[in-house]
Amino acid sequence: MADKSTILIVDDEIVSRYTVEVLLESEGYNLVFAENGEEALEKAEELVPDLMLLDVMMPGMDGFQVCQILRANPRLAELPVVMVTALDDRESRLRGIEVGADDFMSKPFDRAELRARVRTITRLNRYRRLMETEEHLVYLANYDMLTRLPNRSLLIERLRQAIGHARRHRQGLAVISMDLDGFQIINDSLGHEFGDEILRETALRLSQVVPIGTTVARLSSDEFALMYESSSLVNDVSTLVQRILDCISKPFTMDQHEIVITACIGVSVYPSDGDEPLVLLKNANTAMSKAKGQGQNSYKFFTEEMNALALKRLILENHLRKAISRDELRLLYQPQIDLNTGRITGVEALLRWEHPELGLVSPDRFIPVAEETSMIIAIGEWVLQTACEQCKQWQQEGLPAIRVAVNVSSRQFQNSDLLSTIKRVLNDTQLTPSFLELELTESMLMEEDLDKKNSSFSMFRELQNMGIHIAVDDFGTGYSSLSYLKRFPLNTLKIDRSFIKDVCANGDDAAIATAIIAMAHSLQLSVVAEGVEEEMQLAFLKKHFCETAQGFLFSRAISADDMRVLLEQNQQVVAPEKASF
Ligand code: C2E
Ligand code: MG
Ligand code: MG
């Protein structure tokens, strides 16, 4: 088969050039010649040959220099170069390797050897080019050249796969369609280059703001679309969409001009708004048009029901932002009872939000919102400060010293300031660290990220060295392995109240509760049973040597003043059986 590889032969001697021509004549290559270094570089740039046969000894620019210049040129850096040196000139070969030659031959050429080498190198090179072309074609078919984002066809393909996955795992999936406001005007008035730059910057901002695993695609001109998978769609999507709108509306700085652009977004959700890629895309687009009708910088879900939910949540979020400054947060305290003495040894601080219109909002409703929007950092700090202050105050009033337990969410742990916040609060309030307990959930111990785990591990250590107690809340609902419990610096396990509820009626629950108590004791941890409501449950726990309990049987979460009264009663020594709460 004729090989149409192009070979550039660089030699100042006409006899040498002629010899090569004769030797390779019958092979069907496209042979090109250059008489000196400059000409060689020019022709290489112009033709991008498959192979260069380069003589080292040439007047003017020699072969080493030519090779060095080639290697610095991105287009030619990979061009195979065979250097032609004098027979067994070791020095030259070493220099050749330094400047990037791929192979060496010496004159006079051996016909068979020259043919074989040229054949091998050109074949490899052609193969590489073929692969590159193929890859490039696949790339072109799936990506947008301006922004390097996936294009419509790749998005549709990924949607198809994700729908299958969501169907099998009963997961939520959202398609988010986004269009810049007034982009056409910018393009027309400031020019296409400026417009392109805005689109590239938009792509970058989108990619940076979305969670890992989200596909960001560019569909056409200023139309982008995202595919987002989550288990709690309405909450997560409205948070994400708001983050997208915020990041787009930050000023773009270009050529020292500042320009502000906004976007509108429409969201459709699988399976309620469709179970096919094209339908979901179309519905997201319809919702986006509705958002446009509503004004700039806004978003809409496809269904009214979703819009109502999103609105409710937005109202909650906006109100929550003002909760601290408006002094609407309250801390209640629920006693923890030592089952051997019947006395209060600690309290758990439980948060309430007293809103003038919404009424008393339960933490189960607003803590998740606070966590998603990082308001939990400020709220958590307020809780810590208030709880420590209160605990210290009771002590100063001469009440028996008890420990205060504060719930900490994982977002607070991921925040690097937590340790210094705790130190500052303890210093401000002058509370002895051993009177503070932090309650974390099992899932926090199981952080998947190893680095994070190590850093939170050392933070736990430091907290514990300071004397602070660490408790695992709702224990039994997560999947902590024994090795985690052994490794982590812990003091207490709190048995989740779902196991206590039927502990007297359900054999499984009884077995789990007993096993947790036994395991905790063998690891030298103390145990608190949560949600104790009945005497029978209490009797069970005592029988199995659980040392502490918390629950409505003793007291609900009550105000600090009511707690003071309980603590005052607690001062009188009472026999364990007669202790009353
Ligand atoms: P948790 O930490 O497991 O708190 C115990 C919850 O069980 C409290 O609900 C408490 O009132 C309730 N409880 C106590 N005894 C009984 C009982 O005998 N029967 C029943 N049915 N329930 C009982 P609450 O106060 O509504 O708090 C719910 C969750 O909100 C807490 O669960 C905690 O995860 C979270 N939370 C509360 N305050 C804070 C806080 O300050 N920061 C953070 N991050 N989370 C908090
Ligand atoms: Mg708790
Ligand atoms: Mg709990």
Image (cartoon, rainbow, N blue to C red):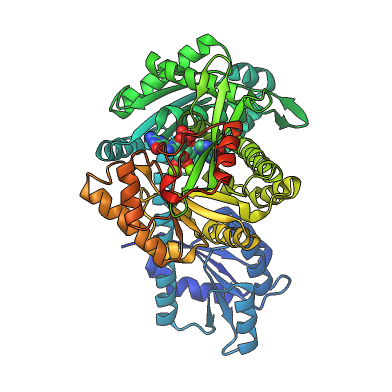
**472 to 192, vertically: above or below:** below
* Residue 386 placement (x, y as % from top left): 65, 38
What residue appears at the point 76 percent right and 27 percent down from the top-left corner? 257
Locate the N terminus and report the quarter of the image it occupies: bottom left
Residue 545 placement, left or right of 399: left
Residue 328 placement, left or right of 176: right
**364 to 392, vertically: above or below:** above
Which is more toward the observer, 241 or 435?
Answer: 435
Residue sticking out furthest to the top: 293
* Residue 112 placement (x, y as % from top left): 40, 81
* Residue 462 placement (x, y as % from top left): 63, 61
What residue appears at the point 37 percent right and 62 percent down from the top-left corner? 519
Residue 40 visible in the picture: no
Residue 255 placement, left or right of 83: right
Residue 52 visible in the picture: yes
Which is more toward the observer, 39 or 441?
Answer: 441
Q: Report the number of numbered marks.
A: 0
Which is more toward the observer, 363 or 141?
Answer: 363
What residue appears at the point 27 percent right and 49 percent down from the top-left corner? 509
What residue appears at the point 52 percent right and 68 percent down from the top-left corner? 80
**105 to 462, vertically: above or below:** below
Q: In which quadrant of the rendered view does residue 56 lie?
A: bottom right
* Residue 520 placement (x, y as % from top left): 40, 61
Residue sticking out furthest to the right: 256
